[in-house]
Image: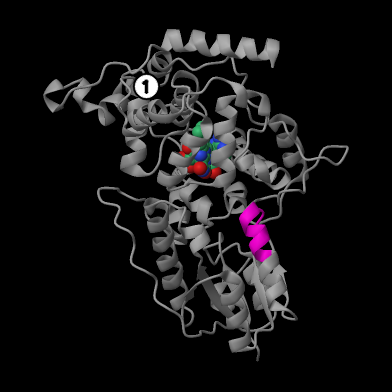
């Protein structure tokens, strides 16, 4: 019987997999992953390493039922077309990709496949981007009404894909490449079993009142798994216990991920361009001074403890607590006067959960130029934020030990004066509003 190809991308799991169900309904299934340089090159070493570990875990899961994952490198339009011809594929099944690169790539693959259909079933979201629209049919720019409509729209129950019931077939493939060296970084365990175990372990724990506390490290840490689809958000939504008082808050966080995916889908340019272009004209630093400030920020040497702790956590773990992401982003844009895209690029290079939609739009939110942005004049005070959300200083002590023990090294003087920078930022903003 002619096989169907199941081309994995951001859906690296076998459970709750609508595209797998669709492929298996057509007969034998050949599982494929394409190492695509256009995607791999811009991902930093940490995200590439986590992806390769996730792929190894997927391969091991597949080998329990068949010959394992076929991995080929190259341009997807060529690789997928050639493999389809080689095995006389009946069709190619995927979970739909809604990002600007992924959507264009899939159109190109569909063209290259000619008569072999590219079948898109499901997506990395509970509700596919573009489904939830305003009463007048437009995409949402504001989170709160989106969230309401998203909850009202609802989502399907998890798909009952069963890898044991699939007739898996193989094809010659290359080995997975060696992982890039990410020395000293303790990556979370990768793969579907690890994602499900983490969800099981975490889901009953308190969230509401502790999620903003980096010192308590109380959030789910599911973001790298959601990034690569080793767990589907619907599996999580189905497992949130409605009786848990924290359920609504946690569900809302997942909705942010879906909101930003639909923003990127509707306005693909917002990944690089100011969503509200007027803030582009604020006085940002450039040249050597920008380099100097960016370097100090990236190395965690600004002289502001909570900022430095966050930036060092990013370098050490490939992850940073959400509250601290907001604080360091605000500090870069408003205190150091560096345009948001520079910070977003650094995050994308180092985050294990780096996701174009979530990262760029959260940066724009903090910078005050995004959809539904924080008002520009609300400028985080890094010292007050540190006091409020790391009240005993445990988070700062962990990442900036020289503060408590000077024998460990010199801690820098503050790179700028927050009060002065805040006043200057507000003045520039007022000027822009008056004359812009
Ligand atoms: P939890 O608090 O357990 O939340 C559960 C899930 O909800 C997360 O895994 C994530 O999928 C989603 N979520 C929570 N908050 C947000 C949010 N504000 N926006 C979108 N989704 C959210 N998240 C990424 O996944 N990738 C990124 O590249 C990314 N970049 C960010 C950049 C900045 C400047 C800021 C302020 C936030 C960014 N976030 C990003 C959002 C958020 O910080 C992380 O999703 C969260 O810290 C991940 O940890 P967790 O899984 O323990 O979160």
Residue found at the far bottom of this picture: 1
Magenta residue span: 97-106
**Residue farthest right in this picture:** 136
Q: Residue at x 38, y 51 (%)?
A: 46
x, y percent for residue 330: 49, 24
Q: Nearer the viewer, residue 150 or 70?
A: 70
Residue lying at 37% horizontally and 69% vertically, measured from the top left = 177
Residue at 62% in and 52% down: 234
Prevailing SS of the magenta stretch:
helix
Q: Is residue 250 visible?
A: no
Q: Is residue 412 shown above or below 207?
A: above
Report the quarter where the C terminus lies.
top right
The residue that mark 1 highlights is 390
For the N terminus, the image quarter is bottom right
> How many numbered markers are drawn?
1
Left or right? Give the position of 136 relative to 261.
right
Q: Is residue 99 magenta?
A: yes
Which percent across, then down, holds residue 111?
Answer: 72, 72
Whether residue 334 appears in magenta in the rendering, the answer is no
For the residue pair 126 and 269, the one nearer the viewer reads as: 269
């Amino acid at each position: 019987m002619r096989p169907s190809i199941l081309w994995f991308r951001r859906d690296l799991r076998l459970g709750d997999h609508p595209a797998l169900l669709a492929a298996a309904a057509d007969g034998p299934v050949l599982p494929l992953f394409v190492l695509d340089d256009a995607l791999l090159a811009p991902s930093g070493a940490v995200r590439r390493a986590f992806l390769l570990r996730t792929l190894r875990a997927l391969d091991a899961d597949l080998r329990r039922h068949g010959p394992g994952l076929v991995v080929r490198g190259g341009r997807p339009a060529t690789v997928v077309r050639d493999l389809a011809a080689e095995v006389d594929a009946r069709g190619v099944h995927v979970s739909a990709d809604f990002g600007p690169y992924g959507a264009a790539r899939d159109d190109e693959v569909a063209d290259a496949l000619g008569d072999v259909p590219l079948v898109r079933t499901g997506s990395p979201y509970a509700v596919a981007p573009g489904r939830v629209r305003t009463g007048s049919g437009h995409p949402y720019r504001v989170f709160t009404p989106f969230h309401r409509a998203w909850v009202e729209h609802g989502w399907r129950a998890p798909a009952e894909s069963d890898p044991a019931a699939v007739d898996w077939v193989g094809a010659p493939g290359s080995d997975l490449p060696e992982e890039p060296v990410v020395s000293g970084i303790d990556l979370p365990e990768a793969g579907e079993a690890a994602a499900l175990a983490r969800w099981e372990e975490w889901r009953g724990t308190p969230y509401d009142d502790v999620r903003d506390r980096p010192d308590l490290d109380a959030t789910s840490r599911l973001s790298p798994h959601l990034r690569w689809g080793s767990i589907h958000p619907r599996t999580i939504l189905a497992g949130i216990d409605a009786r848990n008082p924290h359920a609504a808050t946690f569900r809302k966080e997942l909705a942010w991920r879906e909101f930003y995916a639909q923003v990127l889908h509707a306005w693909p340019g917002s990944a690089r361009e100011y969503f509200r272009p007027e803030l582009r004209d604020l006085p940002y630093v450039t040249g050597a001074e920008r380099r100097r400030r960016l370097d100090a920020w990236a190395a965690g040497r600004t002289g502001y403890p909570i900022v430095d702790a966050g930036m060092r956590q990013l370098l050490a773990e490939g992850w940073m607590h959400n509250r601290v992401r907001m604080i360091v982003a605000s500090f870069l844009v408003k205190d150091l006067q560096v345009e948001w895209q520079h910070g977003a690029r650094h995050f994308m290079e180092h985050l294990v959960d780096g996701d174009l939609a979530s990262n760029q739009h959260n940066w724009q939110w903090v910078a005050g130029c995004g959809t539904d942005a924080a008002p520009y004049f609300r400028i985080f005070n890094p010292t007050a934020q540190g006091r409020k959300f790391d009240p005993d200083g445990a988070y700062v002590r962990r990442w900036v030990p020289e503060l408590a023990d000077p024998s460990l090294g010199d801690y820098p003087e503050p790179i700028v004066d927050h009060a002065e920078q805040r006043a200057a930022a507000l003045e520039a903003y007022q000027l822009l509003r008056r004359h812009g």
